[in-house]
Image (spheres, rainbow, N blue to C red):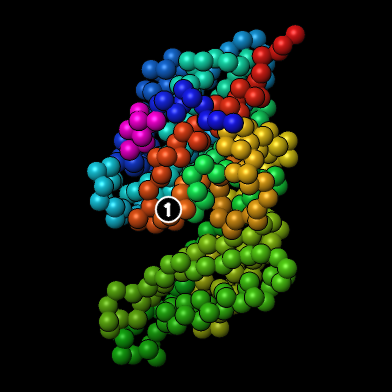
């Protein structure tokens, strides 16, 4: 039971890479510096690189020996529109953009495994190192698939990993079945009639419609979803007006919905639309609903999860490997890849005292780098063992 020695020896260098990426965050489909950084590293290791798969996405290809089996390893590269509050030396150099989900760490872990696997070549088959852009609801996984990811780089199994705040470093989770929720984003434009703030009788007030609609939307989960099923509906943005004495002509509500099935998501879409259109009409206004399903649920393949859990056992001991855990209402666009190729989406501990994901105080824990990288390295060596015969 041990981490990969050669990767542990790289820890200082990996921390430098991770902090470099952290200091230079880029939003989804704008990961130009990041993909340049990744491509330069892969080329330096001697790994073939194909760029432009999903705009800023790229794939490193390493083929060793004669076996035809192949493994895909996927990391995400994008940051979030959050202003970082940390003051350490590697804090974001870009105002309003921050690696608050640890994708800087995921990218570094996969680069580390690529370097190790190229140097040691202790397997036979092909490894596709998939560096995905735009995971945060901007469609990066779909963009790579639409650009022929799995036609150009066929994979028998796929693995991806996300850091988990609250889970101690050195622990993994590799659980079969449903892992993350389907996710939708919605915008509801409420169109009324503007007027002087002192003369509401001349207006169709979209602010009043919005207020009523926010409250009514809370009945969708409580009244339309089976009590035994899980769903979340959050209105997260309210926009209308910009003066004290003007009733605006329009307003917008936006938010997100999470479910564990597409059928339930479609039912909620229907209810959101009915409520928005109906409540607006009752006040003489109009509602235009744009409801977009941006994530499918991640369902881990049973065999891939078994392989992943066994690899983790060998790295940190079975007592540190979670095999059963409830699914999360978070979402992940790895779901679209895992619909095409059997895969396992793991979690790796980011520390018991880590700040939560998407928080302005968050930072990826550099101590987790060697754990994640060791997993990626060993899952390849275990899955692509050279034929003994
Ligand atoms: Zn995120
Ligand atoms: Zn993330």
Answer with left or right where residue 154 lies relative to residue 215. right
Q: Is mark 1 within 8 Å of ligand 2?
A: no
Q: Is residue 222 magenta?
A: no
Inspect the magenta stretch and tell me whether residue 12 lies in it.
Answer: yes
Q: Nearer the viewer, residue 279 or 263?
A: 263
Q: Position of residue 253 (x, y in %)?
A: 46, 69
Residue occupied by mark 1? 354
State the image coordinates of residue 196 (x, y, percent, origin top left): 30, 85
Which quadrant, please, contains the N terminus? top right
Across and down, in percent, residue 11 comes to 39, 30
Q: Residue at x 59, y 44 (%)?
A: 320
Q: Nearer the viewer, residue 41 or 347?
A: 347
Can residue 205 be spotted in the picture?
yes
Quadrant showing the C terminus: top right
- Element under label 1? loop
Graded by Cα atoms within 10 Å as few (under 14), some (14 to 19) or many (20 or more), the crowding at tag 1 reads some
Q: Which of 378/192 is in front? A: 378
Q: Is residue 90 above or below residue 204?
A: above
Q: Main secondary structure of the magenta part?
A: helix
Which range is magenta?
Answer: 11-19
Which residue appears at 63% of the width and 71% of the height? Answer: 221
Q: Residue at x 38, y 17 (%)?
A: 44
């Amino acid at each position: 039971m041990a981490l990969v020695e050669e990767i542990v020896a790289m820890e200082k260098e990996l921390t430098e890479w991770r902090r470099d990426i952290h200091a230079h965050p880029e939003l989804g489909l704008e990961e130009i510096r990041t993909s340049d950084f990744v491509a330069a590293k892969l080329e330096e290791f001697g790994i073939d690189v194909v760029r432009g798969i999903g705009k800023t996405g790229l794939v490193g290809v390493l083929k060793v020996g004669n076996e035809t089996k192949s493994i895909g390893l996927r990391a995400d590269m994008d940051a979030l529109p959050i202003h970082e509050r940390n003051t350490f030396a590697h804090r974001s150099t870009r105002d309003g953009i921050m690696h608050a989900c640890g994708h800087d760490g995921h990218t570094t872990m996969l680069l580390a495994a690529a370097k190790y696997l190229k140097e040691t070549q202790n397997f036979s088959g092909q490894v596709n190192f998939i560096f995905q852009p735009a995971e945060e609801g901007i469609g990066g996984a779909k963009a790579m698939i639409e650009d022929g990811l799995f036609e150009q780089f066929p994979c028998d199994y796929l693995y991806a990993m996300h850091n988990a705040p609250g889970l101690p470093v050195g622990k993994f989770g590799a659980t079969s079945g449903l892992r993350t929720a389907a996710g939708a984003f919605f915008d509801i434009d409420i169109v009324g009639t503007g007027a002087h703030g002192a003369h509401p009788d001349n207006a169709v007030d979209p602010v009043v419609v919005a207020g009523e609609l926010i409250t009514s939307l809370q009945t969708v989960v409580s009244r339309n979803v089976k009590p035994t099923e899980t769903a979340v509906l959050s209105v997260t943005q309210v926009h209308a007006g910009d003066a004290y004495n003007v009733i605006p002509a329009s307003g917008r509500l936006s938010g997100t919905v999470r479910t564990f099935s597409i059928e339930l998501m479609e039912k909620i879409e229907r209810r959101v639309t009915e409520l928005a259109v109906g409540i607006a009409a009752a006040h003489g206004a109009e509602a235009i609903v744009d409801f977009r399903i941006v994530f499918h649920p991640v369902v881990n393949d049973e065999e891939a999860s078994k392989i992943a859990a066994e690899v983790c056992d060998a790295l940190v001991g079975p007592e540190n490997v979670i095999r059963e855990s409830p699914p999360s209402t978070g979402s992940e666009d790895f779901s679209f890849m895992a619909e095409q190729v059997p895969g396992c989406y793991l979690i790796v501990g980011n520390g018991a005292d880590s700040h939560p994901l998407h928080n302005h105080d968050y930072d990826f824990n550099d101590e987790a780098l060697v754990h994640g990288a060791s997993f990626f390295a060993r899952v390849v060596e275990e899955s692509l063992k050279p034929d003994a015969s």
